[in-house]
Image (spheres, rainbow, N blue to C red):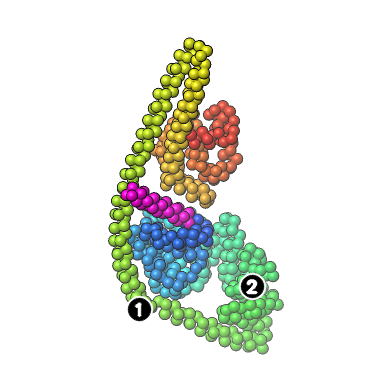
């Protein structure tokens, strides 16, 4: 009875361990696709959401962190800060610098959605302070977003010097992360801040710089979008030469216009800009058309004001006094409305900046949650100790069982060898005597020999499969394999020299004969040896081509050439792959 109970406990614990490995595997897969396909990552997380209560605290917190990261990437509007506060409390004590930064960034995003600008700015600052920019694995992409979101908050608070500071930081960390396109977008936004601060020369310089840079990258759509600032600044300076081609490029490549030539809603100020251009070159009918189009499509008070102001300037230019008086009065009316609208927005921003009562409530909630977390940690510690004791018992029992089975197998193997030797000796004697009455006995001995040889071959094959499988499991569970797998999933970058050295080091530690067999015995090149490592790890020819920065056809040619060099014949039915898998 006790034995049955013990076995049942072992089965339950082993099932729990298997379930946790599967849970961890889903978390890893979700994290791997998070940046490129956040919707797919959320679907993966939803598939294990019902198991969250049964996993350790670390896995549960990782689930919540990834889930909130995916929701943020899918533009979910957060209405509560309870989960991000829980995440920051946990990762501030247990997380890596990247995890702490991400937790505080998500807390800042929640505060932004809740219109709590002071708390959002503080959380963005906290997130930036968590980053370890001296580390090789620093998450520069998240750090770029931290400063980019911070710049957006400063813009809406009319704090343009601070906005420029944050944008320069965002640009810097985008470049450190190798994201040139995002860095250029951060530079492009700086032009708007300089324009608002009436630093027109700086704004023009930046617009021209980013236009050329986007062109070099082949992003004609982004290059065209910078032209709006260039057009506006040139019209302000009454410099109309060459602007017609810029207007055409903007309308053709920016992606803001429908098939009928109408601009997206919210961008109607463009019609005012184009109307002002036609006033400047004395094409008054065209100017009137675009000013009236600005009025007809206006979605904001500012667009209405721009349309009326454009018409009043036009009629002043054409000396149409009646229309001038009418549209001057409308311009004045909408100027007051625009001013009132801006004042209302400023008042709302001021209110958002002084929510001190809520900050006190947040602090109290954090202290309460910290106490709850302390109790949870104590409970978790007791559970871990209990699991360690039970796990130790299981490991000891499993080891004894494995040793017993190994002794039994070794004994059977020795007996088979002894029987084989004896059978061969008997056969030799019988063959020498060549007596007819021994023919039957000779056949029996042959059958016995064949049977024993099959058993020995099966034993050797099984032992070899177990050895090879064990080695492959060690390779596929190594950290450096995950690095190469990530490069294969996102074939934008290739492994560094340091990472190739780390992979060769893992092979030397786990399968030392791999280097001996290929580099010493067959004398292959370092490039061919790297290809053989990737084949042993199970990468497909396309993945190998991406990782080694070459064509897929090059990989196939190199395989055929290598096999012929090693064995003097053509590779048939993937013999090279089978040969590499057999090395142990």
Q: Earlier in the sequence, mark 2 or mark 1?
A: 2
Q: Could you tell me which residue is drawn at 50 percent across and 68 percent down?
A: 76
SS at circle 2? helix
Q: Nearer the viewer, residue 137 or 244?
A: 137
Taking the magenta stretch, the answer to whether it contains residue 93 is no
Left or right: where does residue 522 sit relative to residue 305?
Answer: left
Q: Main secondary structure of the magenta part?
A: helix
| Res 462 label | none
Left or right: where does residue 452 sit relative to residue 13?
Answer: right
Q: Could you tell me which residue is drawn at 48 percent across and 11 percent down?
A: 432
Q: Could you tell me which residue is drawn at 48 percent across and 56 percent down?
A: 30
Q: Estimate how packed mark 2 is, as few (under 14), some (14 to 19) or many (20 or more) residues with alpha carbons within 10 Å.
A: many
Task: For the residues labelled 2 and 1, say whether their Cβ atoms are less than 8 Å apart.
Answer: no
Residue 463 position by quadrant: top left
Q: Which residues are magenta?
A: 1-30
Image location of residue 74, percent across then percent down: 51, 65
| Res 357 label | 1
Taking the magenta stretch, the answer to whether it contains residue 18 is yes
Q: Is residue 310 above or below residue 142?
A: below
According to the image, label 2 marks what residue?
274
Q: Nearer the viewer, residue 268 or 307?
A: 268
Mark in the foreground, 2 or 1: 1
């Amino acid at each position: 009875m006790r034995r049955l109970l013990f076995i049942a406990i072992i089965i339950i614990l082993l099932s729990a361990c298997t379930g946790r490995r599967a849970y961890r595997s889903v978390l890893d897969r979700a994290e791997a696709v998070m940046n490129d396909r956040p919707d797919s990552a959320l679907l993966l997380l939803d598939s294990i959401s019902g198991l969250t209560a049964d996993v350790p605290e670390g896995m549960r917190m990782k689930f919540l962190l990834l889930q909130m990261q995916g929701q943020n990437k899918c533009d979910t509007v957060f209405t509560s800060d309870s989960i991000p506060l829980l995440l920051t409390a946990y990762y501030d004590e247990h997380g890596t610098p990247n995890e702490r930064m991400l937790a505080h960034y998500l807390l800042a995003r929640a505060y932004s959605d809740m219109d709590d600008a002071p708390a959002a700015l503080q959380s963005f600052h906290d997130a930036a302070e968590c980053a370890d920019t001296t580390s090789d694995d620093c998450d520069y992409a998240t750090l770029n977003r931290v400063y980019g979101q911070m710049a957006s908050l400063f813009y809406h608070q009319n704090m343009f010097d601070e906005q420029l500071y944050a944008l320069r930081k965002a640009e810097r960390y985008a470049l450190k992360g190798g994201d040139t396109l995002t860095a250029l977008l951060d530079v492009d936004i700086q032009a708007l801040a300089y324009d608002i601060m009436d630093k027109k020369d700086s704004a023009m310089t930046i617009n021209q710089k980013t236009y050329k840079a986007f062109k070099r990258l082949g992003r004609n759509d982004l290059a065209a979008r910078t032209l709006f600032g260039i057009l506006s600044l040139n019209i302000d300076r009454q410099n109309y030469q060459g602007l017609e081609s810029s207007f055409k490029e903007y309308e053709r490549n920016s992606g803001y216009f429908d098939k009928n030539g109408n601009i997206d809603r919210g961008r109607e100020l463009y019609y005012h800009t184009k109307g002002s251009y036609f006033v400047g070159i004395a094409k008054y009918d065209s100017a009137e058309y675009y000013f009236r189009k600005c009025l007809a499509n206006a979605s904001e008070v500012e667009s209405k004001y721009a349309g009326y102001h454009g018409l009043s300037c036009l009629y002043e230019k054409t000396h149409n006094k009646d229309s001038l008086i009418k549209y001057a009065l409308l311009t004045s009316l909408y100027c007051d409305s625009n001013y009132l609208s801006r004042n209302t927005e400023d008042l709302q921003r001021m209110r958002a900046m002084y929510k001190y009562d809520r900050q006190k409530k947040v602090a109290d909630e954090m202290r309460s949650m910290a106490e709850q977390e302390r109790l949870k940690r104590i409970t978790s510690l007791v559970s871990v100790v209990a699991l360690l004791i039970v796990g130790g018992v299981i490991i000891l029992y499993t080891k004894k069982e494995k040793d017993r089975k190994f002794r039994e197998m070794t004994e059977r193997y020795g007996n088979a060898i002894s029987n084989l030797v004896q059978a061969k000796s008997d056969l030799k004697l019988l063959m020498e005597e060549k007596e007819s009455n021994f023919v039957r006995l000779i056949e029996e001995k042959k059958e016995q020999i064949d049977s024993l040889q099959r058993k020995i071959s099966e034993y050797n094959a099984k032992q070899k499969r177990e050895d090879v499988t064990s080695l492959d499991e060690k390779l596929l569970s190594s950290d450096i394999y995950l690095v190469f797998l990530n490069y294969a999933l996102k074939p934008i970058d290739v492994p560094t020299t340091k990472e190739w050295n780390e992979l060769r080091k893992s092979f030397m530690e786990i399968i030392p004969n791999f280097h001996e067999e290929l580099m010493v015995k067959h004398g292959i090149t370092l490039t061919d040896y790297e290809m053989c490592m990737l084949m042993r790890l199970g990468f497909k020819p396309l993945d190998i081509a991406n990782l080694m920065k070459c064509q897929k056809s090059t990989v196939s040619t190199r395989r055929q050439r290598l096999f012929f060099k090693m064995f003097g014949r053509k590779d048939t039915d993937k013999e090279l792959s089978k040969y590499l898998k057999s090395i142990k």
